[in-house]
């Protein structure tokens, strides 16, 4: 369990999704635009899983504990 600010948690998910490309100026600008347009709400989180030597973002968890699969970072397979 990691507790932090939404922007940091989303940055972790962004890095998992884009890996080394996440650090390019274009993707950093895209991250900022997403963060301004759709900030991660208070008490929301991501379910992160490490398996087969890599991390995936399985789903978004809202403040009520409900799983949501609408976030662009979530893994298509489950």
Image (cartoon, helix red, strand yellow):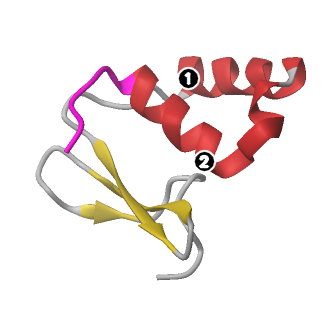
Picture mark count: 2
Q: Position of residue 2 (x, y in %)?
A: 24, 37
Residue 5 placement, left or right of 56: left
Displayed quadrant of residue 8: top left
Q: Main secondary structure of the magenta part?
A: loop
Seen in the picture, residue 59 relative to 25 is either above or below; the reply is: below
Location of residue 20 by image quarter: top right
Mark 2 is surrounded, within 10 Å at the Cα level, by few (under 14), some (14 to 19) or many (20 or more) other residues, namely some
- Would residue 57 be found to the left or right of residue 3 on screen? right
The boundaries of the magenta stretch are 1-6
As drawn, 20 above or below 70: above
At 52% from the left edge and 43% from the top edge, which residue is drawn?
A: 13
Quarter occupied by residue 34: top right
- Marks 2/1: CA distance? 16 Å
Residue 23 position in % (x across, y down): 78, 25
Quadrant of image for the N terminus:
top left
Query: In this view of the protein, which residue sits in the foreground, 13 or 43?
Result: 13
- Residue occupying the far bottom of the picture: 78
Q: Is residue 24 magenta?
A: no
Is mark 2 in CB contact (under 8 Å) with mark 1?
Answer: no
Asked whether 57 or 34 is in front, the reply is: 57
Name the residue located 46 percent from the left edge and 82 percent from the top edge.
78
The residue to which callout 2 is attached is 16
Residue sitting at the far left: 64
Which is in the foreground here, disc 2 or disc 1?
A: 2
Q: Which residue does the image show at 53% across and 30% down from the upper left?
A: 11
Looking at the image, residue 24 sits to the left or right of residue 44; the answer is right
Give left or right: position of 72 versus 45. right
Residue 3, percent across and down? Answer: 21, 30
Determine crowd level at label 1: few under 14, some 14-19, many 20+ residues with C-alpha closer than 10 A.
some
> Which mark is drawn over residue 21?
none
- Give me the disc on residue 35: 1
């Amino acid at each position: 369990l990691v507790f932090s600010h939404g922007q940091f948690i989303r940055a972790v998910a962004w890095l998992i999704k884009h890996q080394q490309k996440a650090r390019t100026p274009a993707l950093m600008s895209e991250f900022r635009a997403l963060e301004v347009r759709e900030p991660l709400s208070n008490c929301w989180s991501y379910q992160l899983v490490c398996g087969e030597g890599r991390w995936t973002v399985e789903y978004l968890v809202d403040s009520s504990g409900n799983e949501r699969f609408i976030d662009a970072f979530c893994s298509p397979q489950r």
